[in-house]
Image (cartoon, rainbow, N blue to C red):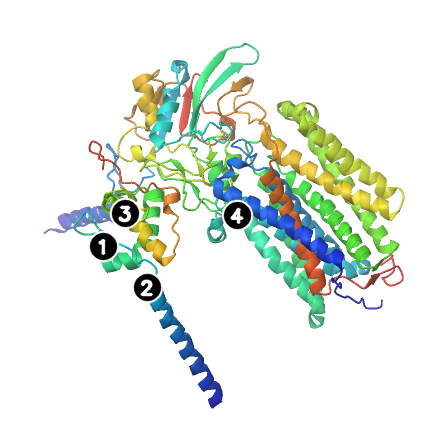
Amino acid sequence: MASVQYREIEGRSGAYFALLALLGALILAGLGAAWAMEHQGHYITGMSNRIVWGTPHVFAVFLIVAASGALNVASIASVFGRDLYRPLARLSGLLALTLLAGGLAVLVLDLGRPDRLIVAMTHYNFKSIFAWNIFLYTGFFAVVALYLWTLFERRMHGYSKRAGLLAFLWRLVLTTGTGLIFGFLVAREPYHGALLAPLFIVMSFSFGLAIFVLVLMAACRWTGRALGDVVLGRLRTLLGVFVATVLYFVAVHHLTNLYVARQHDVERFFLWEGGIYTALFWLGQILVGGILPLALLFGTASRRATAAAVACVIVGGLAQLYVLIIGGQAYPQLMFPEKEVASPFFDGVVAAYAPSLPEVALGVGGVALALALTAVALKVMPFLPRSLADGDVGSAAA
Amino acid sequence: MNPDRRQFLGWGAAAAAASAALAPGFRLIELAQARSPREAASVLQRWGLLIDITKCADCDACVTACHEENGVTGHGRPETDAQWIRKVNLRDKRTGYAQTLPLMCQHCGHPPCVDVCPTGASFRRDDGIVLVDKHTCIGCRYCVLACPYGARSFVHEAVSGQKADVPRGKGTVESCTLCVHRVDRGETPACVEACNRDGGKAMVFGDLNDASAEIHRRLRSETSSQIRADLALNTGVRYQGL
Amino acid sequence: MMRVAAGIIAALLVLAGFAYAEEKRARRVTVPTVKIEKGEACVAPTAEMRRDHMKMLLHQRDRTLRQGFREPRFSLKNCIECHASRETGSVLGKDGFCSSCHAYAAVSMDCFECHTPQRQARTAARP
């Protein structure tokens, strides 16, 4: 196989600077929102004592889960030896880093005391999965940076498989940990249980690859680099498989719950009577996030269909996390079985929540940060192959 | 001295040295009165509450007293205002039987909030009181999610005019402290005092480990239950009449 | 080699000169007013308090909060009892005992986000 040539993007066009300006404005809006939240207190947001994790967390968890999944392509290349994906490994590693940076930025800026980040990084309660995650996230940066170094530095090429394996295993532990943040909540009906860990793993495959394909298509199109059908076709099929797997896990989760009498109320809430959450579940998560992408990915092989499918997966993913995180908190905690509960602290009722401007600005700011870092990195270092045309990549059988 | 006496004195000295060599303030005998301020909280004590909700009337003396004692002020925003204790109204879905009870931090023996706190700010003191170390709390609200009783509140706005014994601040999480500042002085929590003074005399506070304490005797001889006993958290707050 | 050494020494001297000029300039900032209006002596010698009060605060707060030691002498309430200003009753504010030095040294302090800076009015026999 001919060796792949990578080159920085030119990044001198008006459109490029316009993109950076737009992303910069969104980042500034996010920072402004974070400042207002920190200065005045969280009462300016839509979050409350019943819904403590809101829209910023939906975006943050989405970015973090996608970050781990974005590394998938690199893992397939380096760990599983598929030559076809090798030219994509650098971009994959880069996206893993930038998406995680964006997600963590949102998470940290939403803290009640973001000035205590040093405390968070020096005081660990190792019984807390959250503490493990802080450790895993920061370590992920180091591990992926190391892996990227083995890809960039010619003398380190021989170590890329080992570094890739380390990164791959690290991200599996990291995503399991992210899922278990919710899975370890013993007292919350929508959450507790081990299934959330593998669900998050397959979600990461799906969301991460979707963002990867989106960025790849955009980068190649906007810099005039060839992106052949062989590479894209492989990625499409892979994404379709991942989307189907997510649907499978969601189906198993709900079918099991429906079998358990104690969980009937929860299921009725999510599947039927939950208002916005039910709508987002069926229309957002299942239809737009599952069925539509499958139809588009396994149907016509046009670029437009691929781009639409990818966008659907992303929107569906956000809907899924909204239902999970916010819907899961909106559902009341069951302390008194068989009793109707009422109190001044909103016990026993579905909690009200509406996304507020500061929250959305912060979440979108995190996305913009990830994309801006990616755009700048592509200009500064050779992450993108010069060509991914069919003739320039390895054979599809590899 | 003959050898027997020498031996006896030796044992006596050894025993005295052993009891003195344990950590300062760590007593082997039961604590009959409030410990002195120079002593640490002891694992020999387990503070708890027993609440007989059949005596719990329509009043909310406990809520008013708690918020007054701890400087918990409202801002007219019930969704984000902190509540350290609240009255919960129950109605049986089938029979319509109605009850009311005060609900606060249950000071669990195996607190989920302590397990999940990333910095260890949420912790359980040796004598059973579950507290938030506001110095290390980063305001992530994970403990608020983890609490089975919804006992924790996040401070959504700047606080001023705090009570000297009860520091509270924006951006940290807080909950019922079992009036630890009063307990450490040998007094009872404000809610218990108010209930006994103005309410239905439904609440008893005491050391669950002290066989002579009223709470211990009543728990031993009468039926009682924990909320969410299925979680096996070994709560320090027990209820009767649920 | 000699030229390099001479250059480094010259650079260091220039920097020292700037530092000296800084010191002169610093006197334009209001120096802290340390008014101690109550009590014969602090719980530790002045030099030690100046140098180590933060360490003592950090250490004592964990002893009080986590272990339940509540020696009255070392409580923050007791510090404020003596050091609060006679007029405002607070350790913060324009000539506040804590804020005066901290503003001068530009060291932010977190304590009074949560702790009240006010001296408490004397009520019946509270330790």
Q: Is residue B55 left or right of residue A175?
A: left
Can residue B215 be seen by looking at this rendering? no
Q: Quadrant of residue C89?
A: top left
Percent position (x, y) of residue B169?
41, 40
Q: Would you call the spot at circle 4 few (<14 residues within 10 Å), some (14-19), or many (20 or more)?
A: many
Distance between the alpha carbons at the discs numbered 1 and 3:
29 Å
Q: Which residue is mark 3?
A: B22
Visible in this render: residue C101?
yes
Q: Amino acid at mark 3?
A: Leu
Work out how far the residue at label 1 is from the one at label 4, CA to CA, in angstroms.
Answer: 38 Å
Residue drawn 55% across the image and 48% down it:
A108
Quadrant occupied by the N terminus of chain A:
bottom right
Q: Regarding mark 1 in the picture, which secondary structure is present there?
A: loop
User: Mark 4 = which residue?
Assistant: A131
Badge 3: few (under 14), some or many (20 or more) residues near its Cα, within 10 Å? Answer: few
Name the residue type under label 4.
Ala
How far is disc 4 from disc 3 in space, using C-alphas? 34 Å
Q: Nearer the viewer, mark 4 or mark 3?
A: 4
Which chain letter goes with mark 2?
A: C
Q: Which is more N-terminal, label 2 or label 1?
A: 2
Q: Is residue A277 left or right of residue C82?
A: right
Say which mark, if any, is on residue B27.
none
A179 to C58, vertically: above or below: above
Instruction: Give the residue drawn at x 52%, y 48%.
Output: A131
Q: In the displayed structure, would residue A391 be above or below residue C56?
A: below
Residue C44 marker: 1
Q: Which residue reaches farthest left?
A: B1
What type is the residue that disc 2 sits on? Arg
Instruction: Determine which of the numbered discs, if any, sits on residue C27 in the image.
Output: 2
Query: Mark 4, chain letter?
Result: A
